[in-house]
Amino acid sequence: MSRYPEIEPYDRGMLDVGDGNRVYWETSGNPRGKPALVLHGGPGSAAGPNLRRYFDPAAYRIVMLDQRGAGRSLPPASDPATDMSVNTTAHLMADLELLRVHLGIERWLVWGVSWGSVLGLRYAQTHPGIVSELVLTGVATGSNAEVALLTRGLGAIFPGPHKRFLAALPADARDGNPAAAYNRLLESPDPEVRERAARAWTDWETAIIPAPPGSVERFRDPEFRLGFARTVTHYWGNDHFLGEGKDAREGADEGVVLRDAHLLKGVPGTLVQGSLDFGNLLGIVWRLHHAWPDSELVIVDEAGHDAGAVGDAALVAATDRYARSRT
């Protein structure tokens, strides 16, 4: 067994985070255990029950939330009336702080997958002393180079799906940023335009990122598909909202998160990465690991973005080890 048995939450609620948003949260495990925050991927996915299983329920107070617009949080991104201008990385980090204070937590371990790793890294960099450890998998840093790889670079590996991906865009938008172009379609007042764009976007994601059957099944739900595509393209088409403020242009190619890796000094971390994850083509996870001396890198052979059972075992080993270090 690589993960712990299934458990149910002992508490849950909807937190008013402002801007008309209410964020779903839940806690499971030991109410007096070491606090651990779980950050789901996407952006635009949701916190599924299997994510609880990476933690010893006797040792951890496991906190999960659905980020703005995702899952059970309200209003949903699938509703065209939902204001996405108040759904940015800064807003999400502010929500984490509101939830931490609401739950009376001083410090917590942060566990993140894919986009959740981007959010977790930036949260730790900008909120010193709050994150006790980081455990990350399907590691990404939200750089423009990563977006370019996933929307254009992989076209050489998947030429057929990529041709269909670009063909769904207006002819005059095919040479620019595909994520931004898709986001414009997903903000269209025409529901048929939104639905076609959401289907084309998720078809491309399915083509390039092999995932467990359950992950593919969710794209068959038109509401999930629309909310997910709208949220991902909103972030990918706007530099993940990581270039705001005085550093808007500085280090844009490398990416803010990798550039600021030195701010993670003193925060222990574990990076679990499949050797066949296409994000590795840019060497991001290796560069992050070498720029962050307090991290360990676990490479899982013959695994992709989902590191599989071997990756699960490595993630559990990391949380088990960190459980012995109280916050």
Image (spheres, rainbow, N blue to C red):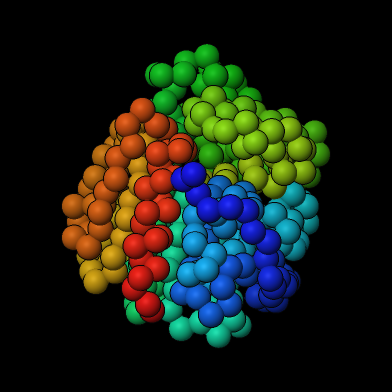
* Residue with the most extreme right position: 191
Residue at x-position 46% and y-position 56%: 112
Answer with the quarter of the image where residue 71 lies: bottom right
Across and down, in percent, residue 253 comes to 30, 47
144 up-or-down from 12: above or below: above
Q: Is residue 34 left or right of residue 30?
A: left
Residue at x-position 36% and y-position 66%: 322
Residue at x-position 29% and y-position 69%: 267
The number of discs equals 0
Nearer-the-camera pick, 49 or 5: 5
Across and down, in percent, residue 231 comes to 61, 49
* Residue with the most extreme top position: 160
63 up-or-down from 233: above or below: below
Nearer-the-camera pick, 223 or 247: 223
Q: Is residue 80 visible?
A: yes
Q: Is residue 25 visible?
A: no
Q: Is residue 63 left or right of residue 149?
A: right
Across and down, in percent, residue 81 comes to 78, 56
Residue at x-position 27% and y-position 49%: 297
Question: Which quarter of the rendered picture does the C terminus lie within?
Answer: bottom left
Nearer-the-camera pick, 80 or 61: 61
Across and down, in percent, residue 282 comes to 29, 37
Q: Is residue 274 left or right of residue 66?
A: left
Nearer-the-camera pick, 86 or 227: 227
